[in-house]
Image: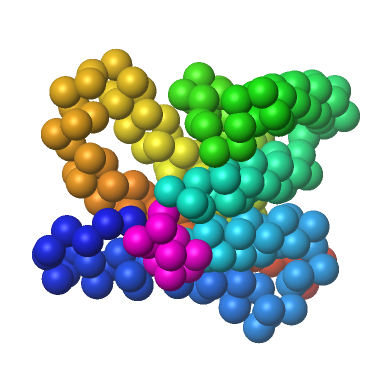
């Protein structure tokens, strides 16, 4: 969330801060917020919007916001897991619950011992890998379940957007962790890459809200 000196990139980054609101507006306009999947999606979008807006406003004192940003990331993780649980069978849901609770407990324990502002590379990597695997599994499940109605499935688009975005984060984190020279010389490039991945993420979320049809409507 830095200033690059390039007016196009800086403007793009500023506009991107409001991208999470687009799916929320469509959900409210279409009155589909009664669906659990859209309740969770709205929460995820609003959390990311508040996080981005807070960073923009307090950019000179960004280090003081690290604990708050950390809390937002953990809450985003929780609500994404809740969203993807909606398509899982009972056995798979219970396994996801156990793994997610274990990860959340590990993060909270780390925060208590090391301090909430201290990130853990491996815990962040595990959280993002968990979301990538879960989103990928739910994407396959939604394709099999919805069949010809796949384009009207909210979970299909949400899974696609989440998988793309968090796969990009995971790639950047792995490169940064393995190659110190890449981390120091390519910070701006990785930030720009994550911005484009985030834009793609909210484009897919927007499609989820725009194209969704309930089973009752699809049978009419």
Task: Give the camera-side residue of 99 and 75.
Answer: 75
> Does the rendering let one see residue 219?
no
In the figure, 115 relative to 49: above or below? above
Q: From this viewpoint, which residue is outermost toward the top?
A: 178
Give the total number of marks visible in the rendering: 0
Q: Position of residue 195 (x, y in %)?
A: 33, 54
Q: Identify the image's colour scheme: rainbow, by chain, secondary structure or one colour.
A: rainbow
Q: In this view, does 184 lie to the left or right of 92?
A: left
Q: Is residue 174 magenta?
A: no
Residue extent of the magenta highlight: 53-62
Q: Where is residue 62 in the image (x, y as percent from the top left)?
A: 41, 54
In the figure, 95 relative to 217: above or below? above
> Does the rendering let one see residue 79?
yes
**Which quadrant does the C terminus fall into?**
bottom right
Task: Give the camera-side residue of 36 and 58.
Answer: 58
Q: Quadrant of residue 21?
A: bottom right
* Residue in the picture at 18% in, 27% down: 182
* Residue in the picture at 14% in, 34% down: 185
**Which quadrant does the N terminus fall into?**
bottom left
Q: Is residue 124 left or right of residue 7?
A: right
Q: Where is residue 17 in the image (x, y as percent from the top left)?
A: 42, 67
* Residue in the picture at 50% in, 46% down: 66
Q: In which quarter of the image is residue 81?
A: top right
Q: Is residue 157 left or right of residue 78?
A: left
Task: Give the camera-side residue of 211 and 31.
Answer: 31
């Amino acid at each position: 969330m830095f200033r690059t000196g390039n007016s196009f990139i800086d403007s793009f980054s500023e506009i991107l801060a409001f991208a999470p609101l687009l799916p929320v507006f469509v959900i409210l306009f279409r009155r589909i917020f009664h669906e659990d999947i859209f309740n969770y999606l709205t929460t995820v979008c609003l959390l990311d919007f508040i996080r981005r807006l807070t960073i923009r406003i307090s950019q000179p004192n960004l280090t003081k916001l690290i604990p708050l940003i950390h809390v937002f990331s953990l809450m985003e993780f929780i609500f994404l897991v809740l969203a993807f649980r909606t398509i899982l069978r009972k056995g798979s849901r219970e396994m996801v619950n156990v793994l997610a609770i274990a990860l959340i407990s590990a993060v909270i324990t780390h925060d208590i011992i090391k301090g909430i502002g201290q990130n853990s590379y491996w815990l962040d990597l595990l959280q993002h890998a968990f979301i990538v695997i879960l989103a990928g599994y739910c994407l396959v499940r939604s394709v099999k379940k919805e069949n010809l109605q796949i384009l009207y499935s909210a979970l299909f688009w949400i899974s696609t957007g989440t998988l793309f975005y968090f796969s990009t984060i995971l790639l950047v984190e792995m490169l940064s962790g393995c190659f110190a020279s890449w981390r120091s010389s390519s910070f701006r490039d990785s930030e720009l890459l994550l911005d484009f991945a985030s834009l793609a993420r909210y484009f897919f979320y927007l499609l989820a809200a725009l194209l969704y049809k309930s089973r009752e409507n699809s049978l009419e």
